[in-house]
């Protein structure tokens, strides 16, 4: 089971912004990054929607274009969003958005029995390698999972 399938089971509709698609998929393919080609296949396989976001010159969040567009898109659609950048999470929450991050989604999937303990650990290790979280973040997620298991 791959991570996108888990997200699809948890949240049904998956949407990425065109700026995120450009940054991760198109630029990644141009640079020959294997993950970009995999990402493109997953977008098609799981029918992930790509949304254009109206640029608003009056909105300055001090974030990258991908994070800013994700927040603006979530505001417009009145939906939750998945963001891992801590500053972006705080800004999204200031707009009363429901924000998920990869580790929170992992815990959510475990809680709702979408993944078992082994899959949790596999995805958790991949996240640690990719995101380089702090020791405190790793400890908090592990402890949260332990408490859910009791």
Image: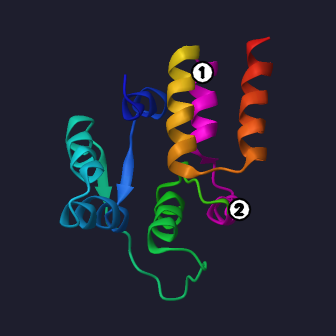
Q: Residue 75: x percent and y percent?
A: 54, 61
The numbered mark, 1 or 2, whose residue comes first in the sequence reads 2
The x and y percentages for residue 135 are 75, 45
Frontmost of labels 1 and 2 is: 1
The reply to whether discs 1 and 2 touch (Cβ–Cβ < 8 Å) is no
Q: Nearer the viewer, residue 61 or 150?
A: 150
Nearer to me, 142 or 91: 142
* Residue pictured at 71% horizontal, 40% vertical: 138
Q: Quadrant of residue 107?
A: top right
Relative side of 64 to 29, left or right: right
Q: Is residue 95 left or right of residue 23?
A: right
Element assignment for label 2: helix
- The answer to whether 67 appears left or right of 1 in the picture is right
* Residue 55 % position (x, y): 41, 80
Our reading of the magenta stretch's main secondary structure is helix
Residue linked to disc 2: 90
Give me the residue at 42% from left, 32% from top: 3
User: How many numbered discs?
Assistant: 2
Residue at 19 percent across and 66 percent down: it is: 30
In the rendered image, the quadrant that contains the N terminus is top left
**Could you tell me which secondary element the residue under label 1 belongs to?**
helix
Which span is picked out in magenta? 87-112
Q: Is residue 98 something that shows in the picture?
A: yes
Q: Quadrant of residue 22?
A: bottom left
Alpha carbon separation for disc pair 1 and 2 = 24 Å
Which residue is pictured at 57% across the width and 33% down the height?
Answer: 124
Q: Is residue 103 magenta?
A: yes
Residue at the spot of label 1: 110
Q: Residue 20: where, in percent of width, then height?
A: 37, 63
**Which quadrant is home to the C terminus?**
top right
């Amino acid at each position: 089971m791959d991570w996108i399938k888990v997200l699809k089971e948890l949240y049904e509709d998956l949407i990425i912004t065109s700026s995120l698609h450009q940054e991760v998929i198109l630029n990644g393919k141009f640079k020959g990054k294997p993950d970009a080609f995999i990402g493109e296949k997953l977008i098609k396989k799981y029918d992930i929607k790509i949304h254009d976001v109206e640029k608003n010159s009056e909105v300055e969040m001090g974030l990258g274009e991908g994070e800013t567009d994700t927040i603006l898109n979530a505001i417009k659609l009145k939906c939750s969003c998945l963001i891992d950048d801590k500053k972006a999470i705080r800004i999204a929450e200031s707009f009363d958005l429901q924000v998920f991050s990869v580790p929170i989604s992992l815990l959510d999937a475990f809680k709702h029995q979408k993944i078992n303990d082994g899959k949790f650990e596999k995805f958790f290790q991949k996240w640690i390698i990719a995101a380089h979280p702090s020791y405190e973040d790793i400890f908090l997620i592990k402890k949260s999972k332990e408490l859910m298991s009791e």
